[in-house]
Image (spheres, helix red, strand yellow):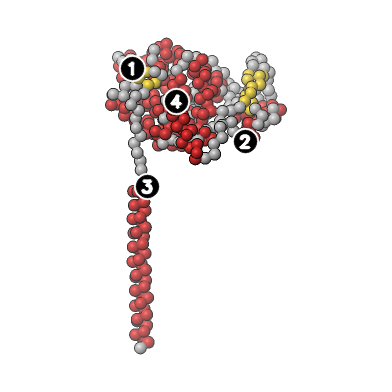
Amino acid sequence: MKNKLKYVLTGMLLLVVISSFIYAKIEIRNIDQEYRNLFARSYRILTPELPAKIDFAGEPVPLNLFYVRESLDREILANTYMQSSTTLMFKRAHRWFPVIEPLLKANDIPDDFKYLAVAESNFANVVSTAGAEGFWQFIKGTGQKYGLEITDEVDERYNVEKATAAACKYFKEAYGEYKSWTLVAASYNRGIDGVGKALDKQGVTSYYDTYLVEETSRYVYRILALKTIYLHPTSYGFYFREKDFYPPLKTYTKSVDSSISDLAAFAASQKINYRILREFNPWLRRYSLTNKSGKTYHITLPKEGFLQGENPSRPGSGSETFFHDTLRIDQARW
């Protein structure tokens, strides 16, 4: 009797274990299926629209050519779905376009060239593998050619105003060579001689008719894509409130025509620290400014209150401004 009871209990226990195992496998299968169903219901990748027409600096882009349309499509796709980088473009452009736009205008350079600075650096003081530096990505020799001071202590490639003025000199020189702003933009990547040789060898006069190395062949299309997305952010899924943008810097300048042996001490005398001095003057590259020639340098300093959390942007508190502000950008920059 005891043995029979033992066998019955053992059998029941085994049945419970087997049932639990089967149920667990079914449960896992159900969870996996539901997960796949959720993915299928929720995840979407949509193709952004190409503009019906577009120009660079007033020069029409021949979108009727399939390779032109597909090249632009590639860059619009890349920059639409490279969301973090493109979001930073909007945030930083709010600060830096107002600095660059008047300088382009004063030098009779089309406004579209501001997007070239975005394509080069996305308004970050980056250094390329070729040694190009600053917003406009000048290499040392080219920067010096167009009037920038580049020494161990001073590097004006990091001075936005002076680097923009130097870029304008280049644009003017290249335009004198090509009489085409599109070719001027392409040459900023390839060089005046590089683009000129390609045109001569191929017997063409248009950027869109020229076979170029991949980096240069993509360059103008990337600029065009950035322009398109910037002008029509909501069409590409970008919605911002005014407070999302980086505010313009509130500054004043202090002129210096003598040496400064200790820039950290100089910063302290201006009631800031060396870190803040470098943030506002990235062109200062060391802890001293040796100025044997008595040249006048203009050091940028923050206005009182700017560093204590004051935000010059128009206040916006939430969803009520979420669509309005971005739509305003669309309309204002169309």
Q: Which residue is mark 1?
A: 206
Q: CA distance from mark 3 to mark 4?
A: 33 Å
Given the image, on which type of amino acid does mark 2 rest? Gly
Q: CA distance from mark 3 to mark 1?
A: 45 Å
Q: Is residue 29 above or below residue 100?
A: below
Q: Residues within 10 Å of mark 4 (few under 14, many from 20)?
A: few
Q: Which residue is mark 4?
A: 333
Q: CA distance from mark 2 to mark 3?
A: 39 Å
Reading the chain from its start, which is encountered first: label 2 or label 1?
Answer: 1
Instruction: Identify the residue at the far front of this view.
Output: 320
> Can I make out residue 222 in this image?
no
Q: Is residue 286 above or below residue 196?
A: below
Q: Which residue is mark 2?
A: 309
Given the image, on which type of amino acid does mark 4 rest? Arg
Q: Position of residue 55 (x, y in %)?
A: 37, 21
Reading the chain from its start, which is encountered first: label 2 or label 4?
Answer: 2
Labelled pair 2, 3 in contact (Cβ < 8 Å): no
Given the image, on which type of amino acid does mark 3 rest? Ser
Which residue shows up at 43% across the image and 14% down it?
Answer: 174
Reading the chain from its start, which is encountered first: label 3 or label 1?
Answer: 3
Q: Residues within 10 Å of mark 2 (few under 14, many from 20)?
A: few
